[in-house]
Image (cartoon, rainbow, N blue to C red):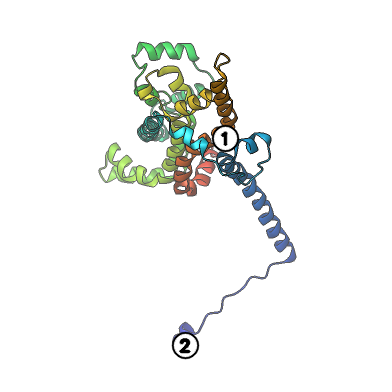
Amino acid sequence: MAEMIRNAPHKKTKIRESRGDRIFSVFNYCLLTVFAVLALYPLVYAFSASVSDPIAVNSGRMVLFPIGFNLEGYKAIFENKWLLTGYANSIFYTVVGTAMNVMVTFMASYSLSRKDMFGHGVITFFMVFTMWFGGGLIPTFLVVKSLGLINTRWVLLLLGLVSVYNCIICRSFISNSIPYELQEAARIDGCNDFQIVWRIIFPLSGPVLAILALYYALGHWNGYFNALMYIDDRALQPLQIFLREILVQNKRIDINADAEELEAMMARVQMAQTMKYALIMVASVPMLIIYPFVQKFFVKGVMIGSVKG
């Protein structure tokens, strides 16, 4: 009898939805569709504007789909000899800077999560204090200059090495998601602090480390202010500086130029709107490629930030 029961075909039980549940599901799907359209429209519009006729873009005739296929904006961007240098520098700052950020933030967060660390509450207070009060731009510039970091790669790697907000997120994850008893058991088994971090805490902190890497990588890739302030050497400047320079140059008009040069300048000014959207696509594509690989951790990371402690 037991064998017959095991071999009998199992029928899937369908849960019958009530009318209210169906209405609620339809409402949710409609609402999510609206949110998806609102999120995708700027990206689709930017791509369409980047390959459209500049006249159609400037006149507002292009609403969603391209009008008059035109790649002059991309051509003007990739003709800049410094573009590849900017890309290489941005990739270097993003990869190396993110690795340093995550490593230092993780070590600081683990230390602050330890219940037996003397003065961890006072240290946390002083770290949080810096989120509202800073030294200002001029004192920061003087400190950077006195340390000899002007026109070096280190200035973009060391400034903002630790984000207090990200540190709090990581500390909350370690404190609330990894039982402290695991560390005590490992210590009884003879593990020291480094072995506990490497064999227990680090492997279990994958979700929060992915979130930290995403936050820091976006900051490094999109950052340009520090490079604008502290780096004059073009060989060290990131991509965002060159993209800004390309856009500014194409909006410049020399009133003392002759008729032919003035006409060419007006054409570049007219194309500047298309170039602006092309610049958005050139700067956004790397992050759009990376984001799908870490997006599954994004919601969990946001929820981690909502935990107090």
State the residue in front, 98 or 103: 98
- Name the residue: 40% across, 27% down: 161
- Name the residue: 39% across, 15% down: 144
Q: Quadrant of residue 266?
A: top right
Q: Position of residue 49 (x, y in %)?
A: 59, 40
- Name the residue: 48% across, 29% down: 243
Report helix, strand or loop for mark 2.
helix
Q: Quadrant of residue 234?
A: top left
Relative height, residue 268 to residue 299 (above, below): above
Q: Position of residue 173 (x, y in %)?
A: 46, 41
Give the amino acid at mark 2.
Met
Q: Quadrant of residue 277?
A: top right
Q: Residue furthest front?
A: 259
Give the amino acid at mark 1.
Thr
Please identify, in this view, whether the residue under mark 2 or under mark 1 is nearer the observer.
1
- Name the residue: 28% across, 41% down: 195
State the residue in front, 97 or 107: 97
State the residue in front, 246 or 22: 246
Q: Position of residue 55 (x, y in %)?
A: 63, 35
State the residue in front, 110 or 37: 37
Residue placed under numbered mark 1 in the picture: 274
Residue placed under numbered mark 2 in the picture: 4
Q: Position of residue 273 (x, y in %)?
A: 59, 32
Instruction: Say if residue 168 shows up in the picture.
Output: no
Relative height, residue 28 to residue 251 (above, below): below
Which is more N-terminal, label 1 or label 2?
2
How far is mark 2 from mark 1, CA to CA?
71 Å
Q: Are marks 2 and 1 in contact (CB under 8 Å)?
A: no
Instruction: Say if residue 259 shows up in the picture.
Output: yes
Report helix, strand or loop for mark 1.
helix
